[in-house]
Image (spheres, grey):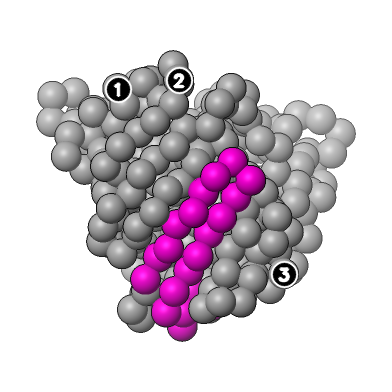
């Protein structure tokens, strides 16, 4: 940990989780992050005596759910924090949420991620994310362009927008850190051309944009150099679903550093991401394939003809 990490943990406890006296908190910490877990445990003990710290071994495969015994502990708690060194599918935590546990999960957790979190204004991130999600929910049409050549239209029909705010203040809410995203699920309603400037999680920007031609929500053609061929190979692993667009999201967090992880990159303020190849478990190995997310940088997004992002700057 750095000298700033305890402050970031306090922000997570007080602001993100809004932890209250007499509440029961379960902290789940992988063994490689035990110092963070213990520091958070000491802070939480000053608020309530109902604190449980669980140290667990790192899973052999990325994308595995938490052990059943730990999920049962979370189900019995008012609040939970999960510090994980890799990816944990958020839907595997649904049983605990259904019993009222509100949770903060930090994936690919590190002191650097937590230190950047300290600088985020979560009220502004939440407001920005909710406002965009509300616009998506009432919109009929989206239009996206970008300097690298994106020109795509999305027809919406009562499509619900979702906000990833960084706040889990109410029973059953879950947020991940880093936070800051407004998103919607896509169907057969996308047509045009999307030019990707980055692949989320890759350390470097693409040498040349990858152009995706989209017809009725599916990738009909992929154009580009060597990196485009690598993308073709990657989406083949998903079978027929690999060419179906699954999600559109807008990042709303100004403290995100691109090139750290896929979970963090998609939160970068003013960027748009498109995901394809929905998360799924392979039959052969039981390994989770994470959806591929491509980033459009400096986009302009219009909702029903009104610009809400202009050259990567959120107007809404």
Asked if 44 appears above or below 173 in the picture, the reply is: above
Asked if 64 appears above or below 165 in the picture, the reply is: above
Question: Residue 213 location, x and y as percent?
Answer: 36, 44
To which residue does mark 3 refer?
Answer: 315
The disc, 3 or 2, on the residue closer to the chain's N-terminal end is 2
Q: In the image shown, does 91 or 132 lie closer to the viewer?
A: 132
Q: What secondary structure is marked by label 2?
A: loop
Say if mark 1 contacts mark 2, CB within 8 Å: no
Q: In the image shown, does 80 or 276 lie closer to the viewer?
A: 276
Asked if 116 appears above or below 57 in the picture, the reply is: below
Distance between the alpha carbons at the discs numbered 3 and 2: 34 Å
To which residue does mark 2 refer?
Answer: 225
For label 1, count other residues whose C-alpha is less than 10 Å away and answer few (under 14), some (14-19) or many (20+). few
Residue at 54 percent across and 63 percent down: it is: 182
| Number of numbered markers | 3
Q: What secondary structure is marked by label 3?
A: loop
Question: Residue 220 location, x and y as percent?
Answer: 26, 42
For label 3, count other residues whose C-alpha is less than 10 Å away and answer few (under 14), some (14-19) or many (20+). few
Q: Which mark is residue 233?
A: 1
Question: Residue 18 location, x and y as percent?
Answer: 66, 67
Distance between the alpha carbons at the discs numbered 1 and 3: 37 Å
Residue segment shown in magenta: 135-155
Q: Could you tell me which quadrant the N terminus lies in?
A: top right
Q: In the image shown, does 213 or 272 lie closer to the viewer?
A: 213
């Amino acid at each position: 940990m750095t000298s700033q990490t305890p402050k970031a943990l306090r922000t997570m406890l007080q602001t993100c989780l809004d932890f209250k006296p007499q509440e029961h908190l379960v902290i789940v910490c992988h063994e490689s992050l035990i110092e963070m877990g213990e520091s958070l445990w000491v802070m939480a003990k000053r608020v309530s005596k109902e604190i449980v710290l669980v140290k667990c071994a790192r899973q052999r495969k990325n994308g595995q759910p938490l052990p059943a015994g730990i999920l049962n502990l979370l189900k019995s708690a008012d609040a939970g924090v999960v510090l994980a060194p890799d990816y944990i599918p958020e839907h595997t935590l649904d049983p605990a949420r259904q019993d009222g546990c509100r949770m903060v999960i930090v994936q690919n957790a590190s002191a650097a991620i937590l230190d950047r979190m300290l600088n985020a204004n979560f009220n502004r991130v939440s407001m920005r994310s909710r406002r965009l999600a509300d616009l998506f929910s009432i919109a009929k049409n989206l239009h996206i362009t970008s300097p690298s050549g994106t020109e795509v239209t999305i027809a919406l029909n009562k499509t619900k927008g979702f906000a990833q705010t960084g706040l889990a203040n109410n029973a059953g809410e879950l947020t991940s850190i880093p936070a800051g995203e407004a998103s919607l699920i896509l169907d057969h309603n996308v047509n045009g051309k999307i030019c990707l400037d980055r692949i989320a999680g890759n350390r470097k920007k693409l040498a040349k944009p990858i152009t995706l031609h989209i017809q009725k929500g599916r990738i009909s053609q992929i154009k580009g150099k060597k990196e485009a061929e690598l993308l073709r190979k990657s989406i083949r692993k998903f079978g027929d679903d690999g060419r179906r667009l699954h999600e559109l999201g807008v990042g709303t967090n100004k403290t995100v550093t691109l090139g750290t992880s896929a979970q963090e990159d998609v939160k970068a303020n003013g960027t748009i991401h498109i995901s394809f190849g929905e998360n799924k478990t392979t039959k052969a190995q039981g390994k989770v394939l994470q959806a591929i997310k491509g980033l459009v940088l400096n986009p302009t997004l219009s909702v029903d003809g009104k610009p809400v992002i202009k050259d990567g700057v959120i107007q809404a």
